[in-house]
Image (tube, helix red, strand yellow):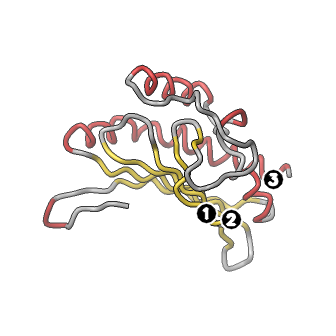
Amino acid sequence: MPSDPDWAGGSLHVDERRTTVDATPAALWSVLQEIGGERGWYSWALAWQVRGLLDRVSGGPGLRRGRRDPVDLRVDDAVDFWRVEEVDPGRLLRLRAEMRLPGLAWLELGVETDDDGATVFAQRAVFYPHGLAGQLYWWSVAPFHGIVFGGMQRGIAQAAERR
């Protein structure tokens, strides 16, 4: 991921969440690798649809692309307005945003185990803003992260616990 040297005044914004899941790492991973497309994003479907519509109106791909396959993800696959940048099976899924943004964005979804052997779902949204527009964008959407990403965290955890 890009970053400017400290002296250049660059910034990288991160929204990071972790939760213990009462499921096996394999169950959690199976949910993560099915995200997007017909399955959706496990929270606030209307918010994701509105974001997709805004993206499409501004010339981006919106949510219309869906997925190549409902259960298999590979590097370079399109997942709605994201692109799969990295897949480390059973551990990490990194998506790079292809939506129209004043900056670069990633969403990382990870499976970890804590010191007691419990399954942990790690979720990280990263934004590298371009200029003032990027800063304004981040700070205007940051209040909604708790709702959308928090709901996503709970929805994914619940789906894994049902498997």
Badge 1 marks a residue whose secondary structure is: strand
Question: On the image, which quarter does residue 60 sit in?
Answer: top left
Q: Residue furthest right?
A: 163
Q: Residue 57 at x, y = what percent?
A: 42, 20
Q: Residue 50 at x, y = what percent?
A: 51, 23
Mark before the other along the chain sequence, 1 or 3: 1
Residue type indicated by callout 2: Pro
Residue type indicated by callout 1: Leu
The total of numbered circles placed on residues is 3
Question: On the image, which quarter does residue 151 sit in?
Answer: top right
Circle 1 Cα neighbour tier, 10 Å, few/some/many (<14 / 14–19 / ≥20): some
Q: Nearer the viewer, mark 2 or mark 1?
A: 2
Badge 3 marks a residue whose secondary structure is: helix
The residue that disc 2 covers is 89
The residue that disc 3 covers is 161
Q: Nearer the viewer, mark 1 or mark 3?
A: 1
Residue type indicated by callout 3: Glu
Q: Nearer the viewer, mark 2 or mark 3?
A: 2
Q: Nearer the viewer, residue 108 or 82?
A: 82
Give the Cα separation between the discs numbered 2 and 1.
Answer: 7 Å
Which residue is drawn at the image coordinates 75% and 65% (left, top)? 25
Q: Which mark is residue 151?
A: none
Circle 3 Cα neighbour tier, 10 Å, few/some/many (<14 / 14–19 / ≥20): some
Which residue is drawn at the image coordinates 41% and 38% (left, top)? 143
Give the Cα separation between the discs numbered 1 and 3.
Answer: 19 Å
The residue that disc 1 covers is 92
Give the Cα separation between the discs numbered 2 and 3.
Answer: 19 Å
Give above or below for 28 relative to 60: below
